[in-house]
Image (spheres, rainbow, N blue to C red):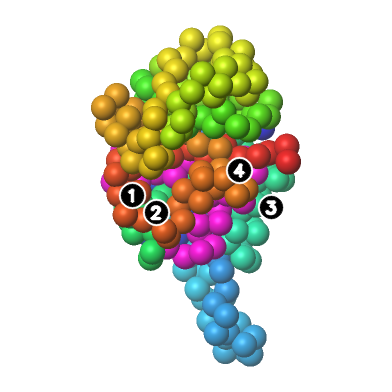
Amino acid sequence: MNNTILVTTDFSDTSRNALDYACALAADTGKEVLLTHIYVIPTAYAGDGLSLVTIDESMESETKLLQEEKDRVARQHPSLKVTTSMTTGNFVESLCEMSDTLRPSLVIIGAFGEYSDVLLWENEWLRVIVAVSCPVLVVPSHKKYKRCTKIAFACDYKKVYTPLQKNALHEWVQQSGAELHIVHVTQNATAEVVNSPVADQVRRAFSALNPVYHLLKEMEVIEAMAGFIAANEIDMLVVVPRVHSFWHSLFNKSYSKQLARLNNTPVLAIHDMEQ
């Protein structure tokens, strides 16, 4: 992975906040920012001459908006390298292709309203969280950047973690200097769980980071994590959204009410990048 943070924009206030967050993070960690806008051609356009002219005019207008956003953050961070990119196509497919080709260290997207507003989110937007191959940071619409001092990793002792997942978490903790809390939520907090082969692998994988381990005996995972985050003043929640796992469906519509408790917390999704 390279030294670039890729941040998407649709020129909304939410996207603007995500860009500001990305620039502040990049300036703090010595990274560069690639600001990208994916123009999705409206399906209502049939491709006739009038529609093509309308598309050209719309793209020209949004190209200017993209430049204005770049100029705005350049004034705020004059020493930061910010480049722009504009492409057309399906949002998820285009972002996945950019991620696979450019291999940015991180993709940042702004949460559409509150996490609990997931009922209003577009399905394609939700797919980004689990489809893009590199780590994706979802930033609440009102959250401003501050260096992490405490990071919580929602850990599952039933699944083995890949080297790329472990390396991504190592990088985040080391570059921020944050205290790492590894949290496992289970209904059965037994010695068998604590001493399982995966739990042992986790302890060996992250021992150099001197993490603090927590075993929460709860039925509701989001409720348990939200309570832990509030009680311990956690700055960021890290999840691995494996297919068919709980965290894969974290932003599922059935959890919208529970997700309201995470509205102040940036969520970093580190994917099954070797599967």
The type of residue carrying mark 2 is Tyr
**Badge 1: few (under 14), some or many (20 or more) residues near its Cα, within 10 Å?**
some
Report the Cα–Cα distance between label 2 and label 1: 5 Å
- Per the image, the residue denoted by label 1 is 258
Q: Can you tell which mark lies on residue 255? A: 2
Left or right: where 195 falls relative to 272: left
Please say if 210 is above or below 262. Answer: above
Residue 215, by quadrant, is top left
Q: Please, what secondary structure does the residue beneath circle 2 have?
A: helix
Left or right: where 256 falls relative to 61: left
Quadrant in which the C terminus appears: top right
Residue 102 position in % (x across, y down): 68, 42
The residue closer to the viewer here, 191 or 148, is 191
- Per the image, the residue denoted by label 4 is 242
Mark nearer the viewer, 3 or 4: 4
Circles 4, 1 touching at the beta carbon (< 8 Å): no
Report the Cα–Cα distance between label 2 and label 3: 29 Å
The type of residue carrying mark 4 is Arg
Mark before the other along the chain sequence, 4 or 2 = 4
Circles 1, 3 touching at the beta carbon (< 8 Å): no
The type of residue carrying mark 1 is Gln
Mark before the other along the chain sequence, 4 or 1 = 4
Q: Range of the magenta residues?
A: 121-144
Report the Cα–Cα distance between label 3 and label 4: 20 Å
Report the Cα–Cα distance between label 1 and label 3: 32 Å
**Badge 3: few (under 14), some or many (20 or more) residues near its Cα, within 10 Å?**
few
